[in-house]
Amino acid sequence: MKIGFVGLGNMGLPMALNLLKAGHEVRGFDLVQSQLDTFAAAGGVIASNANACAQDADVFISMLPASRHVEGLYLGEQGVLASAHPKTLLIDCSTISPQVAQAVSQAAQAKGFAMADAPVSGGTAGAQAGTLTFMVGAQPSVLDYIRPILEKMGKNIFHAGGNGAGQTAKVCNNMLLGIQMLGTCEALRLGIANGLDPKVLSDIMSKSSGRNWVLELYNPCPGVMENVPASRDYAGGFGVDLMLKDMGLATENAKDLEASVPLGELAQQLYEAHSKAGYGQLDFSSVFNLKK
Ligand code: NAD
């Protein structure tokens, strides 16, 4: 299959590399030259712009930061929907607002395209290992078609519902993750203040009722775990500003529906304070160092 891939960042690049490894022809584009160089070194074809990625592609995948980037990519006179052939199946893997995902897929369907929202979970390590979880919002027949491609990048593929439902599942998951990270940081900080070794405390909590994904795979305290952002000065990984965006998606969605998310709102304020203190580009586990 010929695949177009736009957005070769922390997540998109390893995902595209897994498609190359699986033998697909992948044409990619990003705004950052160093990302393109790594992609080309692995056998990817660099396109001159985003629309050129979609030309003649069987499947076109986007992995961009936020809603506005996705709207900019697909919609308008210069957008992919205006230049691609409707035989190209569109998959947006970015984490964006469920409402924007619905609006973009409706615009796509109006022009004869099939489209899926397929945001992911699993972090950069999951993207590299090809073990991501995909949360798909699409018609069942669209998911049947794209499943073999998603399986080259992920291990668990869930059908959340129709267009936009994948994003709703992702927003709920990331609100929980953001809260879980802050809770884990607080527990570790309290233990350290009492003189406990953070590695010993992490081992204890990982086998006790405080066990969670952050403790098991993404410990925020430097020196406890190898190969996590905390052990490389919080570089790479999942940026504070991306987590702040996801918290905003959750609290806005809750406001629209009059759903109650007081912990989500508090977590949003804490990530915002950390971002405003100048740490927006660091991995979100750097909230371990949040000054209050
Ligand atoms: P990133 O900032 O590392 O990558 C985004 C890439 O998009 C950048 O390389 C940027 O240059 C590129 N880009 C932006 N606008 C573009 C355009 N118009 N044309 C071409 N390229 C463009 O972000 P990321 O960490 O890879 O995250 C991507 C998405 O995945 C986000 O929505 C994020 O919330 C989500 N996500 C991230 C993680 C994670 O652990 N990093 C995990 C799950 C989901």
Image: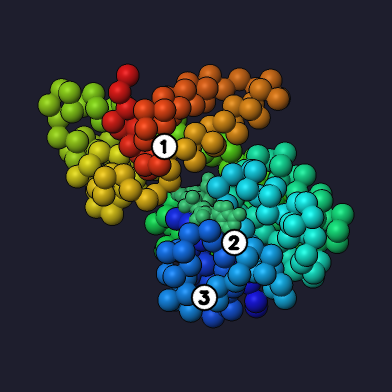
Residue 41 is left or right of residue 87, and the answer is left
Res 149 seen here? no
Residue that appears at 86% across and 58% down: 111
**Mark 2 and mark 3 in contact (Cβ < 8 Å)?**
no
Give the class, few, some or many, for how many residues have Cα within 10 Å of label 1's Cα (few <14, many ≥20): many
Q: CA distance from mark 1 to mark 2?
A: 23 Å
Residue type at mark 1 is: Gly
Q: CA distance from mark 1 to mark 3?
A: 30 Å
Amino acid type, callout 3: Gly
Counting from the top left corner in percent of width and height, residue 281 is at: 40, 42
Picture quarter with the C terminus: top left
Label 3 vs label 2: CA separation?
A: 12 Å
- Visible in this render: residue 81? yes
* Residue highlighted by disc 2: 6
Proximity of marks 1 and 2: CB atoms separated by less than 8 Å: no
Q: Residue at x 25, y 30 (%)?
A: 188
Q: Is residue 183 above or below residue 31?
A: above
Question: Which one is nearer the viewer's eye here, 31 or 109?
Answer: 31
Quarter of the picture containing the N terminus is bottom right
Residue at 59% x, 27% y: name it. 251
